[in-house]
Image (cartoon, helix red, strand yellow):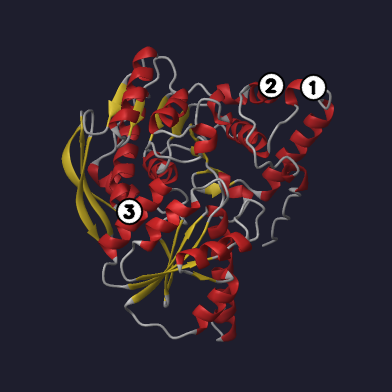
């Protein structure tokens, strides 16, 4: 089997920026030049502060179980650009990604003097490319994840069949606002006239903003706890147990393998979306058994992902205070008796001190701060200074992991690596490479 040649990403990466250039005019112009592929798709548009990725993972499995060809656009990626765009869990191929990048490079060269396109960003290009590719592939449905906010996010050019808002929490406050109400106003920007909206478990003051917008848009609104019910039934080593009911289903017990009480909420939101989508397209609803099968098959790397069993290492991309609160609750629920080492780093747009304060409260834990190779990361000097100020440890993460993986470990301890998904991407690749080296050294490398 010939390995596909990696596409040249240098042209795309030249458009990377640390300051999002909000607005839809550039997106509309790019897509118009490509024949408006976003208007050829059946879209489910999903926004929210946290929970978008796992909700999409559940929904994708559910819709695939219905026999549909499901396209997805998610961000950021953990391993490669390719995984942001996929069909039925298969990332876009290097060949197709390279072909589309070349098409867009040529398009931008032709339009070099177009004033509207000045200031275009990497994320806008990837969004346009996703709409383009999924339309070319004629998927049955495209699930599009909002990148940041909603109202002015580049994904918000679509005309969706359904929209969803998972949660509202404080994140990207410098760009979206310093209150739940202000952030909810931005997230509610994805609500479209007469398009059904499903919301997850959202604080009352933020939910009121969303309800007002839905009423203004005459968008039918399905609210968690009102239009559909999700009730936690506790977590075990096998995952989270919850009950779900809605207008189509009596209350029944379900299980998701992803850890954390919030995963029941995310799975319930996905079931509600799937039922509404099937109803709107006159497709049979999934049976209880089909839902069970779909949920159990769901995985989402970097979210309470146990990447190593001996030693026990868990990765979780809790990259804001709202997600960190959920993470600490999950640790207390599932691993109350284990000694924990926590390795943490994040990017400069996040509330560093607040998240460090939350992690310091985890029982039976030792917190270690680090930095990583990315211009968006807090610097080594900043993290060292904070560690000194807070009475914590600082370590180079690669040196720390190299020593940790070689050491002997007890069964009653775990290493949690958390923070930015950009950080986790580097850590995950490092651990996987070390495991491959170890298998090769001991003659266990696969042929």
Q: Which mark is residue 258?
A: none
Q: What is the CA distance from the residue labelled 1 to the residue labelled 3?
A: 49 Å
Q: Which circle, 3 or 2, is nearer the viewer?
A: 2
- Label 2 packing within 10 angstroms: few (<14), some (14-19), many (20+): some
Mark 1 touching mark 2, by CB under 8 A?
yes
Query: Which residue appears at 34% of the width and 43% of the height?
Result: 266
Q: Residues within 10 Å of mark 1 (few under 14, many from 20)?
A: few
Q: Quadrant of the N terminus?
A: bottom right
* Residue 237 seen in render: no
Q: Secondary structure at mark 3?
A: helix
- Residue at the disc numbered 2: 29
Residue wearing tag 3: 296
Give the side of residue 75 with respect to residue 3, left or right. Answer: left
- Percent across and percent down for residue 264 are 28, 47
Q: Element at badge 2?
A: helix
Residue drawn where x is 64% and y is 33% of the image: 124
Q: Residues within 10 Å of mark 3 (few under 14, many from 20)?
A: some
**Residue depicted at 59% across the width and 30% down the height:** 154
How far apart, in angstroms, are the residues tagged by discs 3 and 2? 41 Å
Percent x, y of residue 132: 63, 31
Q: Which residue is mark 1?
A: 114
Q: Earlier in the sequence, mark 3 or mark 2?
A: 2
Total tally of numbered discs in the picture? 3
């Amino acid at each position: 089997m010939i390995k596909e040649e990696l596409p040249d990403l240098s042209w795309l990466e030249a458009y990377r920026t640390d300051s999002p250039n909000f607005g839809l005019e550039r997106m509309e112009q790019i897509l118009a030049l490509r024949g408006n592929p976003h208007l050829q798709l059946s879209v489910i548009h999903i926004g929210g502060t946290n929970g978008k990725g796992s909700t999409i993972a559940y929904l994708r499995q559910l819709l695939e179980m219905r026999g549909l060809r499901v396209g997805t656009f998610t961000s950021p990626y953990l391993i490669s650009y390719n995984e942001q765009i996929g069909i039925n869990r298969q990332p876009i191929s290097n060949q197709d990604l390279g072909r589309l990048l070349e098409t867009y490079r040529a398009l931008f060269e032709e339009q070099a003097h177009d004033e509207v396109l000045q200031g275009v960003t990497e994320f806008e290009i990837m969004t346009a490319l996703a709409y383009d590719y999924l339309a070319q592939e004629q998927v049955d449905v495209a699930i599009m994840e909002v990148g940041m906010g909603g109202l002015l996010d580049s994904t918000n050019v679509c005309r969706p069949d359904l929209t969803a808002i998972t949660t509202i929490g404080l994140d990207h406050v410098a760009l979206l606002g310093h209150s739940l109400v202000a952030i909810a106003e931005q997230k509610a920007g994805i609500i479209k006239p007469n398009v059904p909206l499903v919301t997850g478990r959202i604080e009352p003051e933020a939910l009121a903003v969303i309800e007002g917008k839905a009423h203004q848009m005459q968008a039918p609104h399905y609210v968690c706890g009102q239009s559909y019910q999700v009730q936690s039934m506790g977590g075990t080593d096998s995952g989270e147990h919850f009950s779900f009911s809605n207008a189509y289903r009596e209350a029944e017990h379900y299980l998701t393998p992803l850890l954390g009480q919030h995963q029941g909420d995310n799975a319930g939101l996905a079931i509600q979306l799937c039922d509404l989508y099937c109803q709107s397209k006159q497709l049979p609803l999934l049976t209880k058994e089909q839902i069970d099968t779909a949920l159990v098959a769901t995985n989402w790397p970097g979210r309470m992902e146990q990447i190593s069993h001996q030693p026990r290492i868990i990765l979780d991309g809790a990259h804001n205070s709202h997600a960190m609160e959920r993470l600490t609750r999950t640790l207390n629920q599932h691993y109350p008796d284990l000694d924990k080492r926590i390795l943490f780093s994040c990017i400069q747009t996040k509330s560093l001190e607040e998240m460090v304060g939350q992690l310091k409260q985890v029982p039976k834990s030792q917190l270690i701060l680090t930095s990583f190779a990315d211009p968006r990361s807090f610097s080594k000097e900043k993290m060292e200074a904070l560690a000194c100020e807070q009475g914590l440890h600082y370590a180079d993460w690669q040196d720390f992991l190299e020593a940790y993986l070689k050491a002997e470990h007890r069964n009653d301890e775990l290493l949690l690596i958390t923070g930015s998904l950009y950080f986790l991407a580097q850590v995950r690749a490092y651990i996987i490479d070390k495991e491959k080296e170890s298998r090769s050294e001991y003659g266990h490398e696969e042929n």
